[in-house]
Image: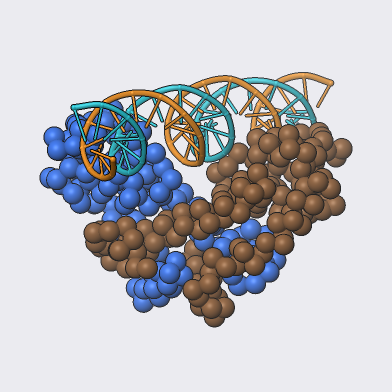
Chain colours: A blue, B brown, C cyan, D orange
Amino acid sequence: MKLEEEIKQRKFRNEFHKLAVNIIYTHSWLMNYHKKIFDKFDITSNQFNILRILRGQYPKPASINLLKERMLDKMSDASRLVDRLLKKGLVERKISSEDRRKVDVIITKKGLKLLSQIDELNSEFDRVFKNINKQEAQILNDLLDKMRG
Amino acid sequence: MKLEEEIKQRKFRNEFHKLAVNIIYTHSWLMNYHKKIFDKFDITSNQFNILRILRGQYPKPASINLLKERMLDKMSDASRLVDRLLKKGLVERKISSEDRRKVDVIITKKGLKLLSQIDELNSEFDRVFKNINKQEAQILNDLLDKMRG
DNA sequence: AAAGAATATATGTTATAACATTTGTAATAA
DNA sequence: TTATTACAAATGTTATAACATATATTCTTT
């Protein structure tokens, strides 16, 4: 649906202004969709993101800084996110043997199992994009990449 | 820059998967940029959003529900957002004369003045999109609108 | 080797988000 | 008219984000 109709009665200065609003609105739309899926697994979007990074490293450990670097939302507090995952038994944490300032974070078997359960819902994640085809998705990806420079 | 490089070493299942990550990452990128501007005015992105809606209504009042409906991030707590704006003297709030359940929220002169100050920075807001042209912005807008259905 | 700078992470605090519940008012039905 | 339902907003609570600061460790310089 056209953005103007969804948020009603707002006029935009130009296409760029509309684009800023569109990105914010679309992000919120996407997050709401994702949340419904993640709720089934008692996990948040950010926690899932961390687990994905850890699986990418597995069986190598990741430091807190590595997690911070690769997180989608750079602002978040990786240290305490790991805390929460630890409480759920989804990751392990121990002081690095090479550099005692660092921490080695590794995803547990339980964490890997959870991710593989979520993997089964990949088609559900993709379904949010049912209104566009592969080519259109590619155009969006290319333009978003270009936009950020 | 290509998303794969920015978040490093991640592979995507398909274009749709990349698009989901791209939207989240781009949103974060945009919010960080906006935040730098809003910080100068001691205001948050959500608070600005509410003020914009109220200016659109001005001099008519808006109810809390109207604000909720039109907010970009539907999840937010409009009632307490208005509280914060009230403390800053940017809005007024009184019980509606027609329906005592409702609340009339109106932007104050101070609020309007703040918005007009921020208006002067419109070119700064647009500058975040310096890497794409108007036509490309329009393609993005059309595809995002289409995507949400 | 000692002092100072740099680095990695943790912690404290405040603000805000998320969710459920409560309160007060209006509309509807019996 | 009273009881029931629906509605609008506020409030309480818990979780998380945002920001600054502290702590521990390593690196660099002299």
> Would you place residue B55 above or below residue D13 in this image?
below
Residue B129: x and y, percent?
53, 69
> Would you place residue B87 above or below residue B128 in this image?
above
Q: Quadrant of the C terminus of chain A?
A: bottom left
- Residue drawn at (58%, 61%), measured in percent from left and top? A21
> Would you place residue C23 above or below residue C9 in this image?
above
- Residue drawn at (28%, 66%), measured in percent from left and top? B14
Q: Is residue A42 visible?
A: no
* Nearer-the-camera pick, B84 or A67: A67
* Nearer-the-camera pick, A126 or A140: A140
Q: Quadrant of residue D5?
A: top right
- Residue drawn at (65%, 72%), measured in percent from left and top? A14
Q: Quadrant of residue C4?
A: top left
Q: Is residue B100 left or right of residue A87?
A: right
Q: Quadrant of residue A89?
A: top left
Q: Is residue B129 visible?
A: yes
Residue B95: x and y, percent?
82, 35
Residue B64: x and y, percent?
70, 42
* Nearer-the-camera pick, A44 or A70: A70
Q: Quadrant of the N terminus of chain A?
A: bottom right
Q: Extreme bottom residue here?
A: B135
* Nearer-the-camera pick, A115 or A144: A144
Residue B111: x and y, percent?
77, 47
Number of marks in the image? 0
- Residue drawn at (62%, 64%), measured in percent from left and top? B124
